[in-house]
Image (spheres, rainbow, N blue to C red):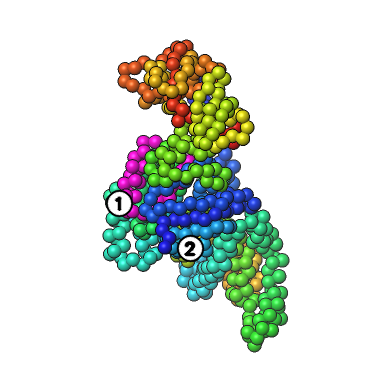
Amino acid sequence: MACGQGRAGLARVAAPWLLLLPAFLLMTYAFVLPIGSFLEYGFYRFERGRLVQDFTFETYRRFLLDPYYHAVILDTVKVAAIVTTIALLVGYPLAYGLWRLRSPSLQRWFGLIIFSPVLVSVVVRSYGWTVLLADQGAVNWTLMRLGLIGEPLELVYNLTGVVISLSHVFLPFVVFPIYAAMTRLDPSLREAAMDLGAGWWTTFRRVTLPLTLPGIVAAAQIAFTLALGALVTPALLGGGRVLVLPLQVYRATSEINWPFAAVGGLALLLMALVAVVLSNRLLRYAEP
Amino acid sequence: MRQGVVLEAVSKSFRGFRAVDAVSFRIPEGSFFSLLGPSGCGKSTTLRMLSGFEDPDEGRIWIGDQAMNGVPAYRRPTNMVFQRWALFPHMTAFDNVAFGPSVARVPRADRRRQVMEALDLVGLADFAGRKPRQLSGGQMQRVALARALVNKPRVLLLDEPLGALDLKLRLQMQVELKRIQASVGATFVYVTHDQGEALTMSDQVAIMRDGRIEQMGAPHEVYDAPATRFVASFLGNANLLPVSVRALAGGRAEVALGTLAFPARVGQAPAGATGVVALRYEAVRIGPAAQGQPVRTRGRILDASFSGSSVHYLIAAEPGFSLTVEDRHKVDERPWTRGTEVDLGWHGDAVRLFPEAD
Ligand SMILES: Nc1ncnc2c1ncn2[C@@H]1O[C@H](COP(=O)(O)OP(=O)(O)OP(=O)(O)O)[C@@H](O)[C@H]1O
Ligand SMILES: [Mg+2]
């Protein structure tokens, strides 16, 4: 009896660990070990196209002191911040509209439309945007026809094009966490606010917005970290003028400059971590 | 000039389903009015049309001399206490109560005083700084009440506000609510499916069924003189016994149950020669108390269930029917045991005749 109970107890304790084991092994192999070798390679040196395996802070020193890399880091954070902001500004009203739709079947259709950017390959999507945003593209053509501008705007092969394309593709990652937070709201809370004299705007500002803040924070985390790591879009739409860190890392790996790739990779990881920690801080204010 | 709350033939349908069907009533200013009825009968929908969350398809709503049709919820002189209270989870009790005054731009110092007065009224002044999740059900209920009352509504709407509380707390809150109503003087419109609650607290009760009002009146009126078979069986406990109708004139009838003939009052006149009578459990006297009652018979006790203040007996009556009788339990008196032969008696006025089909 006692033995049987002991075994059942053991199974109960062991089951979660067994279920976590595959993920744990994968994480060790694909994340922890590479980080270890990142750390190791970061302390090597790259000289005249060759890896020199002696312990030195040389690569870190160059990365941290060279104004060129300051500009790169600043650009990377800037792109990520602008993209996150735009995705939130477009995504929140979209999520709100989706939430307020009366018909569930319309909700499903709009959900699919919002999701669709992810269904298209990044290469196809980027070329699509170059066509749309080009000097003779549909956007400039329309604006000129409407007489809003005299000269075509430079919308592509610069920061603008990258930001537009990234905001577009991250939209579903922003809309759905916010939408989920909205559907978790008790509908009688909005009614209570209106009953107490609040119009639409006051109800939104004092009830809906604070209570959907966790969704906004989750959305911002996802968009920001994804934007930090974006490579293909800046490469194809940046026209060589958007020198974000992933591009630098990519170039370093193709030159087999492992020390620089390692340091750049670690810097990206660190930025993402800082973003996550900061936004989790913010969440505390939204706690009930 | 109009007074109180008036509904004139108000209807509301949801996708063709008539949730509220031509409901009319008039609530005197400052009184306690209950909408009572089984689940799904349209009580909440009626209340939500008063609060402005739903607009009626037909009919008119008046509060005082103001027509309410088309007036949004935030411009009505009403406030609502929700069934699950709907407190704002990210605000303290104080901020919840202060929500209305701050929206109304009451100056900060006045606002503070009003909020503390309201919290005081419900006995929660010491809990002002707590968030809803740090409060018990009863306390949240009081905060919800204070949050509505602080706005000095002309009409307070309550949608089963005590439904989620346990029995003891519910009885205590019923008394509190009456006290608070007396002290603020607002009109209370109270929705409940608990008949005890409605009868205890209300000046007027409306009994609803399938979107219509079956009967309206003071609690003792609707209890003593149910107008329909539904009301007779919904309020309190009544035996519904099939009878043949011997004679029917004015408000009185002569009916027969097997071999027993007795008089009855007419609730609703049956069309044919048969009907049902409603006879309340507690209207039947048992044992020595049956002596001197106008209608008398005998029966055998089939079952007895003791519930503290009273005993319910299931009895096979000699004329060939069975009925349930409620007898008040007195200290040191043993309930009758199963198989005992007992006298039964009741007064003709306690019996009401209705048609067979409901
Ligand atoms: N928004 C809605 N859409 C569709 N049907 C509705 C809606 N609101 C209410 N109904 C229907 O209208 C009828 C009356 O609903 P209501 O909520 O008024 O009942 P109730 O008397 O308050 O019941 P309960 O005691 O269960 O709260 C029900 O059959 C309900 O299904
Ligand atoms: Mg209801």
The structure residue drawn at horizontal position 46% and vertical position 33%, both measured from the top left corner, is B236
Secondary element under disc 1, as helix, strand or loop, is helix
User: Is residue B186 highlighted in magenta?
Assistant: yes
Say the numbered circle drawn on residue B162.
Answer: none
Q: Secondary structure at mark 2?
A: strand
- The location of residue B134, given as percent across then percent down, is 36, 47
Query: Label 1 neighbourhood size at 10 Å, few (<14), some (14-19), many (20+)?
Result: few
Q: Chain of mark 1?
A: B
Q: Nearer the viewer, residue B180 or B214?
A: B214
Q: Residue at x 36, y 22 (%)?
A: B329
Q: Residue at x 55, y 22 (%)?
A: B257
Question: Which part of the image, by quadrant, shows the N terminus of chain B?
Answer: bottom left
Q: Residue A119: x, y in percent?
A: 69, 59
The chain letter under disc 2 is B
Point out the frontmost of discs 1 and 2: 2
Question: Residue A155 at what x, y percent from top left?
Answer: 63, 78
Q: Residue A123 lies in what quarter of the image?
A: bottom right
Residue B290: percent from the left, percent from the top?
41, 19
Q: What residue would you read off at disc 1?
A: B183
Which residue was labeled with disc 2?
Answer: B67
Tell whether position B160 is magenta: no
Q: Main secondary structure of the magenta part?
A: helix
Q: Are marks 1 and 2 in contact (CB under 8 Å)?
A: no
Q: Amino acid at mark 2?
A: Ala
Q: Is mark 1 within 8 Å of ligand 2?
A: no
Q: Residues within 10 Å of mark 2 (few under 14, many from 20)?
A: few
**What residue range appears in magenta?**
B167-195
